[in-house]
Image (cartoon, rainbow, N blue to C red):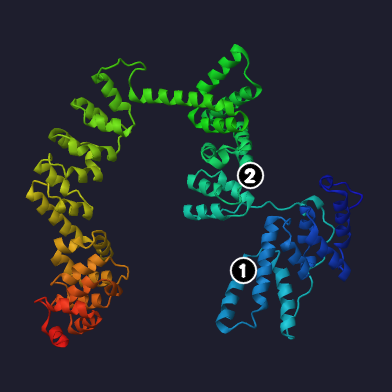
């Protein structure tokens, strides 16, 4: 082999060529103990994948356990080979303690060993069998060993023999939540680098908040990133926004979004000009031109630069920033830059404002505008939210309330529907239709509480809807409804709630239950005796004497529970309870 000149030898260093020559000389013969030690040391310390591949493809070396173990532990061993060797090592670990394992554990280990053995490649199975026979011989003297694998002859193609196998990409299908958790906790820089370039925003955000993320890693990823959203994610975080190296990486990236690149170019040119010093009329004009082009998001970086390098420029930065804010306010208002003093805005200006504005106070004013056309226009404004509508509904007249109730967008909004039900301008027909569309029990309870609702039929319909919704709920949903209403459902639906002992039993079993619910149940004469007995044993009872009083005055409370509660009262509380004519005679007899 020394006389031949293989192309792959140019890839090796002089020391690695010497190692290859030694391995080629040892390969066609049975190695001695010293040669086994030499090969083991190479398997553990070499970083050349061709040499490690050659060792792994020599079967009568792999039957020596320490060599196989060293190859499996060497991080430079080609990934497909190392993965197979690691499976073999895990199989040895399973079989080593098989004889000493208990019955159930022995069966489990045997099944796992069979599964691992089936996954081994065919060329590795005889080697594993040989080593397992050696292990069996140590454990049981009656075991038989196999012969060593045949010694290989001189290979015809050394380049093919030493070529590392290509690693097949392993694609493990993880859910989005698992990928997010993995991105936020992984310590592998290559894996983290891949998560930073994922198209899903949740995964990128989790990777950006990984403690292993560094300025150098983010800069490297940005320069080779093909996901435009990553640039916005990094630019939007303060810890990266102010770093010069990150900004340079964004600027130098070939696939950076054009808008973001322009922002950084303008601010960079401006700061360079200010750093050199703008002299003369032309220099001042150029500074002014760059300030007018400066994006609003870049003012924080420019302000920080001015604080560090040119504090006298802070006033200039503020002047241009205030000018930008005034321009934006003028554009959003839809008015001319020089409005006439002391005049009302025209209908055209108000319609423009209703169509383009995003300011909450301007939207509410447009909803209350005297002209109905402005009201119709503002309902189609994409910037309008239910918050503005809910604030304006109490002041709307009947025509606008009715129009809002049948609007193609806002007529189906639950928040708007619930607010419309409390408007005195809403007609009874529309109100009866809206009540049937309400799915929130709390909204129906609000209708029953509101004394301003002029139509009695509305409250009756709300009560019927509340009853049907409660009866269609599961037990857990009923418990949630009772807790969220503070027990008020008991007052409006006493028959439905108090006859449902299963729900009440689970409700009262909660040790953190609202005391007001226990008080309502203890006071009601329709509460089942089993529930009253459960309340009497509730831990909240000791801290709330009104609940104890209501239980003592309730004739359905079991006698044993009443006597026990009576003993918990102080003498003054007992004297106060004796003044009530509803106190049971049993308790009066005890206190006599």
Measure the alpha-carbon separation of dots 2 and 1. Answer: 38 Å
Crowd class of label 1 (few under 14; some 14 to 19; many from 20; radius 10 Å) = some
* Residue at which label 1 appears: 116
Instruction: Look at 20% across and 78% down and name the residue there.
Output: 572
Residue 105 figure quarter = bottom right
Left or right of 378, for residue 150: right
Residue 287 sits above or below residue 28 on the image:
above
**Residue 447 visible in the shown view:** yes
Image spot of residue 209 (x, y percent):
54, 49
In front of the other: 466 or 165: 466
Task: Kindly identify which numbered label has been placed on residue 186.
Answer: none
Image spot of residue 439 (x, y percent):
22, 52
Instruction: Look at 26% across and 62% down and name the residue there.
Output: 483
In front of the other: 521 or 403: 521
Residue farthest along the right direction in this orientation: 3
Residue 397 sits above or below residue 106 on the image:
above
Of discs 2 and 1, which sits in the foreground? 2
Instruction: Look at 85% across and 59% down and name the residue there.
Output: 23
Left or right of 247, for residue 580: left
Mark 1 lies on a secondary structure that is helix
Mark 2 lies on a secondary structure that is helix
Left or right of 265, for residue 566: left
| Quarter of the image that includes the C terminus | bottom left
Task: Kindly identify which numbered label has been placed on residue 217.
Answer: 2
Image spot of residue 560 (x, y percent):
20, 85
Q: Earlier in the sequence, mark 2 or mark 1?
A: 1
Residue 356 sits above or below residue 451 on the image:
above
């Amino acid at each position: 082999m020394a006389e031949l000149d293989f192309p792959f030898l140019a890839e090796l260093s002089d020391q690695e060529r010497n190692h290859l020559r030694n391995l080629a000389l040892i390969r066609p013969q049975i190695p001695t103990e010293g040669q086994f030690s030499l090969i083991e040391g190479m398997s553990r310390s070499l970083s050349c994948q061709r040499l490690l591949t050659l060792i792994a493809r020599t079967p009568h070396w792999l039957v020596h356990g320490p060599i196989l173990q060293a190859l499996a532990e060497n991080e430079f061993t080609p990934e497909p080979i190392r993965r197979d060797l690691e499976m073999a090592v895990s199989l040895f670990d399973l079989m080593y303690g098989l004889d000493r394992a208990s019955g159930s554990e022995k069966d489990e280990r045997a099944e796992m060993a069979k599964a691992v053995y089936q996954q081994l490649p065919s060329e590795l199975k005889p080697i594993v069998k040989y080593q397992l026979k050696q292990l069996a011989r140590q454990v049981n003297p009656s075991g038989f060993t196999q012969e060593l694998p045949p010694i290989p002859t001189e290979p015809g193609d050394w380049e093919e023999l030493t070529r590392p196998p290509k690693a097949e990409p392993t694609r493990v299908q993880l859910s989005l939540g698992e990928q997010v958790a993995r991105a936020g906790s992984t310590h592998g820089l290559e894996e983290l680098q891949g998560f930073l370039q994922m198209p899903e925003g949740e995964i990128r955000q989790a990777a950006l908040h990984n403690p292993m993320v560094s300025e150098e890693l983010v800069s490297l990823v940005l320069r080779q990133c093909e996901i435009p959203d990553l640039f916005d994610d990094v630019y939007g975080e303060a810890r990266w926004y102010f770093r010069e190296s990150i900004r340079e990486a964004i600027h130098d990236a070939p696939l950076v979004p054009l808008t973001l690149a322009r922002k950084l170019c303008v601010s960079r040119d401006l700061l360079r000009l200010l750093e050199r010093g703008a002299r003369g009329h032309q220099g001042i004009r150029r500074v002014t031109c760059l300030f007018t082009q400066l994006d609003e998001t870049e003012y924080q970086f420019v302000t920080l630069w001015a604080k560090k390098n040119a504090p006298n420029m802070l006033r200039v930065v503020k002047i241009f920033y205030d000018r930008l804010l005034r321009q934006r306010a003028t554009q959003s208002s839809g008015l001319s830059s020089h409005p006439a003093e002391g005049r009302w805005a025209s209908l055209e200006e108000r319609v423009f404002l209703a169509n383009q504005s995003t300011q909450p106070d301007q939207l509410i004013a447009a909803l209350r505008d005297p002209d109905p056309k402005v009201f119709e226009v503002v309902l189609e404004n994409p910037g309008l939210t239910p918050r503005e509508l809910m604030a304006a509904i109490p002041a709307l007249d009947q025509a606008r309330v009715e129009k809002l109730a049948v609007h193609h967008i806002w007529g189906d909004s639950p928040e708007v529907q619930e607010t419309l039900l409390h408007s005195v301008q809403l007609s009874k027909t529309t109100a009866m239709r809206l009540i049937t569309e309400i799915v929130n029990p709390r909204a129906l309870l609000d209708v029953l509480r509101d004394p301003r609702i002029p139509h009695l039929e509305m409250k009756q319909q709300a009560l019927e809807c509340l009853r049907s919704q409660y009866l269609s709920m599961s037990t857990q949903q009923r418990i949630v409804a009772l807790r969220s209403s503070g027990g008020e459902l008991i007052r409006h639906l006493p028959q439905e709630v108090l006859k449902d002992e299963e729900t009440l039993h689970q409700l009262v079993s909660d040790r953190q239950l609202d005391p007001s619910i226990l008080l309502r149940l203890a006071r009601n004469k329709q509460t089942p005796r089993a529930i009253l007995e459960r309340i009497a044993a509730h831990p909240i009872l000791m801290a709330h004497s009104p609940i104890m009083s209501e239980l003592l005055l309730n004739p359905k409370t079991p006698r044993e529970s009443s006597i026990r509660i009576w003993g918990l009262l102080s003498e003054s509380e007992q004297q106060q309870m004796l003044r009530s004519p509803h106190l049971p005679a049993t308790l009066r007899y005890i206190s006599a």
